[in-house]
Image: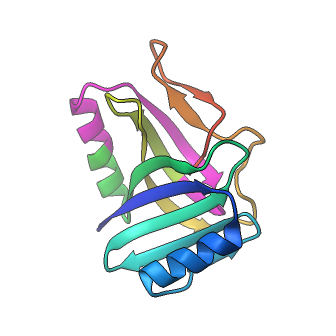
Amino acid sequence: MKRMHIHVFIDDLQQSINFYSNLFGSEPTKRKDDYAKWMLNDPKINFAISISDSKSGIDHLGIQVDEDSELKDMRERLAKADMKTFAEGETVCCYSKSDKTWVEDPSGIAWETYRTMEDAETFNNSPAKNIISSDSETPNIESASCC
């Protein structure tokens, strides 16, 4: 099964949790001091918010999968799109351990495709958050969001 993922940077966590809980008709499935996530079935979406030092708004989009075979299929689809990808592999991000691949669409919007394996105690496994840049021959990691 595939699930759409949207990650939004916000200014005030509690106000945003109140707003999105009312919008979705449910409380977050995961909540931390700087992060909240809703795993919804209607609509089928993984919607996450986190506090950011940069401007608020959509950080990135993604497609979350349940199985390794689905992740392999998504990676093959990205390769067919002839876009530069960054296979991050197993990493900790958004309080979860996941296997990820990143790409930027033709307009520069960051997308990730990933499979979550388990919960984690930290937001990410490095001080810098990850995003790709299409300015070079191969995408590189710069500071932005990881999940």
**Image: magenta residue range:** 75-98
User: Residue 38, how many percent across, how many down?
Assistant: 50, 74
User: Residue 13, how many percent across, how many down?
Assistant: 69, 68
Does residue 92 lie above or below 81 as drawn? below
| Camera-side residue of 50 and 82 | 50
| Camera-side residue of 133 and 58 | 58
Q: Is residue 78 magenta?
A: yes
Does residue 73 lie above or below 104 as drawn? below
Residue drawn at (21%, 31%) of the image = 80
- Quadrant into which the N terminus falls: bottom left
The reply, left or right, for residue 103 in relation to residue 83 is right
Residue drawn at (26%, 48%) of the image = 73
Specify the farthest residue to the left: 80
The reply, left or right, for residue 77 in relation to residue 140 is left
Question: How is the protein colored in the picture?
Answer: rainbow
The reply, left or right, for residue 86 in relation to residue 74 is right
User: Residue 102, how many percent across, how many down?
Assistant: 45, 38
| Camera-side residue of 81 and 59 | 59
Q: Is residue 94 magenta?
A: yes
Specify the farthest residue to the top: 137
Residue drawn at (45%, 41%) of the image = 101
When asked about the image quadrant of residue 46, the answer is: bottom left
User: Residue 77, how many percent across, how many down?
Assistant: 24, 40
Does residue 42 lie above or below 46 as drawn? below
